[in-house]
Amino acid sequence: MSTTLIRPAQPTLHTLRHLGGKAAARLLGLPPETTDYTVRRVRVPMRDGVQLVADHYAPATGSPTGTLLVRGPYGRGFPFGLTFGALYAARGYHVVLQSVRGTFGSGGVFEPMANEVADGADTVAWLREQPWFTGRFASIGISYLGFTQWALLQDPPPELATAVIMVGPHDFNESTWGTGTFAINDFLGWSDMVAHQEDPVRVRAALRQLQTRRRAARAAAAVPLGDAARAILGTGAPWFESWVEHSEPDDPFWDALRCTEALDRVQVPVLLVGGWQDIFIGQTLQQYAHLRRRGVDVALTVGPWTHTQLLTTGFSTCAREALDWLGTHLGGAATTRRLSRVRVYVTGGGGGWRGLPDWPPPTTERPLYLRPGGYLGETAPAPKGLVPATFRYDPASPTPTTGGPLLSAHGGYRDDSRLASRGDVLAFTSATLTEDVYVYGCPVVELAHGADSPHADLFVRVSEVDAKGRSRNVSEAYRRLRTAAKPKSEKIVRLELDGMAHRIRAGSRIRLLIAGSWSPRYAHNLGSGEPVLTGRQPTPVTHTVRYGRSRLLLPVGPAELSADSVADPGGDRG
């Protein structure tokens, strides 16, 4: 197999890459560039005869730092050509930035995630034969570009020295169906974007992306959902219906779309980067915990970001951390020394970055019990004689998604004060805090719950209510109940919320919100037990929450975590 030069990089584009890289380095406080570089287009053959297109960034130096492999479906232009190509090539790395099968000139048909194990292995086989290959390489990338790294780690090649995985899932079934219902906003929106991202009319493609949230919300509210989703997608994204039709986690359909074995096979050092408001934060924390238990050299950085903010407000921190990690583990000179295995940004005005030897730090469980009148209290009420709290969920008017982990610009930390006044939401609020409360880890909500239908969902959220009465989200969870208890009986439903590192300030209050839907992030439950795609019979559901055993459990820790030296992440700090 050999490298084939398709065409050299256009001079104007090449110049823009250089100018963009230099400007970005100054703006982001990155270490200075060390070399010039060239870019050329290559074709990489796969075992089935398909050829994948890549850009090879080659540093103009006799002593390259190492080689980086980056594989993704979003093209090789801006921003990925700058953030994963030019930035590293100008600091001595050979970079292979490859478009996965069926995207941006690569042959074959794009089937999300399905071919990445084999195609990644074939790309490494090609890499070995290149005369410029440095003998060892690292993988790096964000989101889908993180999944392709886990795919490579299903059978780790001996030349792989390290991996830098930013908000990258390893289990796509967990991403789509992990709550028991389909994440419609995130993955209908993503499918629409990917299906139309190569539209030659760039303005039309950009306008389509700006309308993604509105279009996804319209589809999520429609009955049947499948017809509305297909109307949005047109002839694109043929994979979408198959995702929605295969709802069970043990369905063999998902075998090619998950890389759980990689967590047991990886041996090389791994840097994981996540965001507290990222849709994949649960998997990032799971990856860290699993690798840590195995004794793998793993480090974790979590900032106050959503998924998309890692390429905006979070990029400077991510780039510096990646350069430092690669310098340490791929043979170059590290620009700084990582002071702690774990770096987390404490939100809520908690003092910024903190360094920890592990995650989560030691904490004490602090219970807050649901009490009549919408209160959260330190002690459990005697349930005898108390009228349970109830709310009615109407599929025709579901509780609207307000901030939180979303694959859109509307996610993150938001004012959610209006939710507490909705008739389909229960809100329980604590007394005003007399001292700061620091929460590290995953809160848990236990509800003595019943419903008048076996087909019911639960959404719970912890928010902080400031001294002015404004409520802002911190952490949340969603669950489709397999079989809800009947109204006059109860079943303890335990929901683990997303991980957090947050300071709830003195003078604020803690609020717990409970609802029966969260649309359009999740496909709302019709209440009839019908399939998500084809259901047509919306049926309201009345939920019952009993007092006594219903409570919020907060993992509370000390304020005195050591300050770390990571720069401010900018943007929304929660």
Image: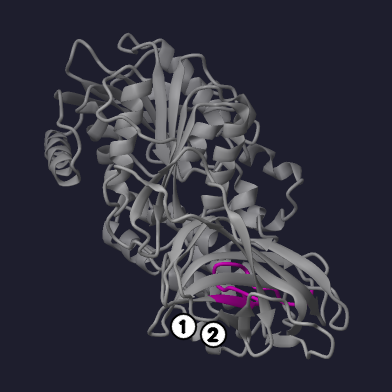
| Amino acid bearing label 2 | Ala
What residue is shown with label 1?
A: 417
The answer to which of 129 and 515 lies nearer the viewer is 515
Q: Rounded to the nearest whole Å, what is the CA distance between mark 2 and mark 1?
A: 6 Å
Instruction: Establish if 416 lies above or below 176.
Output: below
Residue 8: give x, y in percent of width and height: 21, 27
Residue position for label 2: 420
The one nearer the camera, 497 or 354, is 354
Do labels 2 and 1 touch, CB within 8 Å?
Answer: yes
Quadrant in which the N terminus is drawn: top left
Q: Look at the image and say whether residue 556 sits in the magenta stretch.
A: no
Q: What label does residue 48 carry, if any?
A: none
Left or right relative to 90: residue 265: right
Q: Main secondary structure of the magenta part?
A: loop
Q: Residues within 10 Å of mark 2 (few under 14, many from 20)?
A: some
Q: Residue at x 79, y 71 (%)?
A: 529
Locate residue 502: give its quadrant. bottom left
State the extent of the magenta-drawn residues as a range: 511-528
Q: Is residue 459 above or below residue 426?
A: above
Question: Left or right: where does residue 117 sit relative to residue 301?
Answer: right
Q: Is residue 427 left or right of residue 108?
A: right
Q: Quadrant of residue 318?
A: top left
SS under mark 2:
helix
Say which residue appears at 19% left-offset and 28% top-offset: 90
In reply to whether residue 523 is colored magenta, the answer given is yes
Q: Residues within 10 Å of mark 1 (few under 14, many from 20)?
A: some
